[in-house]
Image (spheres, helix red, strand yellow):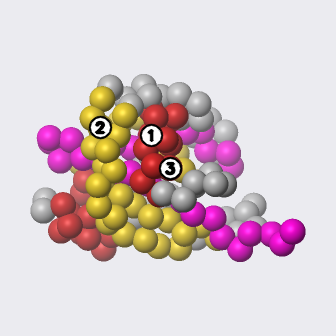
Amino acid sequence: MAEALFQLGQKALVVNEKNEVLVVGQEALSRPGHTWYDLPGGRVDEGEDDLGIALARELQEELQVKAEVHDLLTMSLAPKHPKRKYDIILSVFHCSIIKGEPVPSGEITSFKWIPIDELHTMPDSRYNQEIVETFKRKLGL
């Protein structure tokens, strides 16, 4: 069987009433003791053919919340990591938490709400200012 050339991944842009974005933390594998923050989400599992359902599953697993997945905001090719043999095609969806409060679980060690304009300034952020402006425009912020 041939190795995969790419995998599908998805991230959730969850915005609260203060226009803050939910980000989740996990230990950075390359820097022990350092927490790396990103939008919640993950890869689409084998056999899953609906990105929205896969993303809702990831939010349930990572944060113990029930989420509603709304519009696709952007798709991009995530930079290849030296330890991966494949690229990740990354989709970002607007999502809402419809039941529960975030509780970190599994590989997620923490979470926090940050102003959407700070998303591109997080260390190692894959979301540049142009992407953040696209999010804001599509959400009417």
Residue 14 on the magenta segment? yes
* Figure quadrant of residue 71: bottom left
> What's the residue at 61%, 44% (across, down)?
28
Alpha-carbon span between mark 1 and mark 2: 9 Å
Numbered circle sitting on residue 59: 1
Numbered circle sitting on residue 97: 2
Q: Which residues are magenta?
A: 1-30
**Quick check: can you spot residue 56?**
yes
Nearer-the-camera pick, 49 or 29: 49
Residue 108 point in image, percent of width and height:
53, 35
Q: What residue did someone put label 3 on? A: 54
Residue 26 point in image, percent of width and height:
55, 39
Q: Amino acid at mark 3?
A: Ala
Nearer-the-camera pick, 97 or 23: 97
- Count the marks: how many? 3
Give the structural element (helix, strand or loop) at label 1: helix
Q: Amino acid at mark 2?
A: Ile
* Figure quadrant of residue 80: bottom right
> What's the residue at 68%, 49% (across, down)?
30
> What's the residue at 73%, 63% (across, down)?
84
Residue 103 point in image, percent of width and height:
42, 25
Q: Amino acid at mark 1?
A: Leu
Q: Are marks 2 and 3 in contact (CB under 8 Å)?
A: no
User: Between disc 2 and disc 3, whose residue precedes?
Assistant: 3
Q: Is residue 89 left or right of residue 99?
A: right
Alpha-carbon span between mark 1 and mark 3: 9 Å
Q: Are marks 1 and 2 in contact (CB under 8 Å)?
A: yes
Q: Quadrant of the N terminus?
A: bottom right
